[in-house]
Image (cartoon, helix red, strand yellow):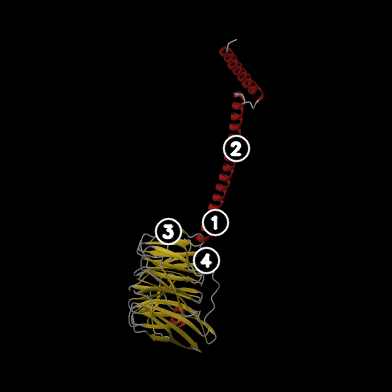
Amino acid sequence: MSDSQRKRAKTTATASKTATAKKAKGKTGVAKKPKTEVGKGIESSKRDISKKESSKRDISKKDDKKESTKSESSKKDDKKKESKSENTDLPALPKSEPAHDSFLVVAGTYERILYGLEARVVGSVMTLNPQFIFPAHIGCIKAVSAGGRYLASGSTDEIIKLYDLKKRVELGSLHEHSGSITALQFHGSSHLLSASEDGVICIFRTNDWEPLKMLRGHKGAVNGIAIHPSGKLALSVAQDRTIIIWNLLTGQRASRVKTPQIGEIVAWSPSGSHYIVAYATEVQVYKVGQTESLATVFSKQRILCALVATYENAEYVLCGCQDKRIHIYSADGVERASVECHENRIKGLSLVDVVLDGVVHAIVVSISSDGRIKTWKLADLLDPICKNAEQSTPGDDVMDLVAEPLATYNADVRLTCVASSTATF
């Protein structure tokens, strides 16, 4: 065999050896997984992933449910909080104790000055002494009210100023209204009601002065408000010729009655069984729960202020008028007497109980554009009427009374509004 043939035989042998070695390696080495097994692994891993995702979705659904229940519970809590905050339930007032040594008289003026007088009683003698005099607003003062240790004043500047009578400091101001303040009334020392030309009545809580409720029911400026002695009801009259009775337990309107004229003044009787609505020259007497008036008072003079007083188990309506006189009417609408009290129109009346000579007397405080603040004993005004009642007959002339005031203070400014309180500090 030649050399070339030997070489070819060697190369073929080596090639065959390498081929057999590869085959052997393929049989004994690390083999790849069959395609079918790989497919099954992928599908199983996909199923595992889908299971994990579904479990995640279940968890997320549970979380969403938890969050939704939490949000619903939080909403309920918010509603509860809102309902609590909107609850304007005013506590019933205990019978106020009469003043023994002194009581407070507060008056506002056109000149923006606020007057505070101490009416001091020694025996049967009363004096009016100024305690504070200062400019309180940048506009005419139209309303004042005192409740416990607090004093509030409202003005054409649309602001309510608050004062602490005990500390003799200004607490701040309330800016909830967008019109001139027309009326203010404290209920004890726990709540304050305010009315404005913006047609809104606001109820404030005195411990933090937060507005609890905005009563919106009138379509015009609110002229007057009055809180029932029980604290459950309030009255309001406005330019829209309506009377609204408010349920203060819910903060909602209880009833709305149309009036023949624009109501300017509203006031409860001390017992809370009746209330009056005063117009320009008329006063209507209503019983609670009835829409028709029981009686109507007709006046020949412009009525500027009015209140209801109880004397000898009978109720009387006192009206301060343009003719400088206080006109006195019985509850059935009959004018019984009148007394000239001032030298100019009477702008405000207030009533307070005071102990004089060991006996409780109702004291009437009157103010006038003549600048004078006067106090009167209610008995001096009504005793002659009671004595004359047995002898008088319907159609008799109205009694022209002469009475002396217990005390007089000359502020020498144009007075606009007045409030009195038995609390002094």
Distance of mark 2 from mark 4, alpha carbons? 60 Å
Q: Nearer the viewer, residue 362 or 72?
A: 72
Quick one: label 4 or label 1, which is nearer the N terminus? Answer: 1
- Residues at badges 2 and 4 in contact (C-beta under 8 Å)? no
Mark 3 or 1, closer to the camera: 1
Residue to which mark 2 is pinned: 52
Q: Residue at x 45, y 71 (%)?
A: 185
Res. 305 image quadrant: bottom left
Label 1: state its secondary structure: helix
Q: Secondary structure at mark 2?
A: helix
Neighbourhood count class around disc 1 (C-alpha, 10 Å): few under 14, some 14–19, many 20 upward: few
The amino acid marked with disc number 2 is: Lys
Kindly identify which residue carries mark 1: 80
Mark 2 or 4, which is nearer the eye?
A: 2
Most foreground residue, 391 or 188: 188
Q: Tell which of 120 and 208 is nearer to you.
A: 208
Residue at far front of view:
2
Q: Amino acid at mark 1?
A: Lys
Q: Are marks 3 and 2 in contact (CB under 8 Å)?
A: no
Instruction: Quickly name the residue at label 4.
Output: 90
Q: Mark 4 and mark 3: span between their CA atoms?
A: 21 Å
The reply to whether discs 2 and 1 touch (Cβ–Cβ < 8 Å) is no
Q: Is residue 9 above or below residue 81?
A: above
| Rendered position, 70 above or below 244 | above
Relative horizontal placement of residue 366, taking residue 68 as reference (left or right): left
Residue wearing tag 3: 256
Mark earlier in primary sequence (3, 1) = 1
Q: Earlier in the sequence, mark 2 or mark 4?
A: 2
Q: Secondary structure at mark 4?
A: loop
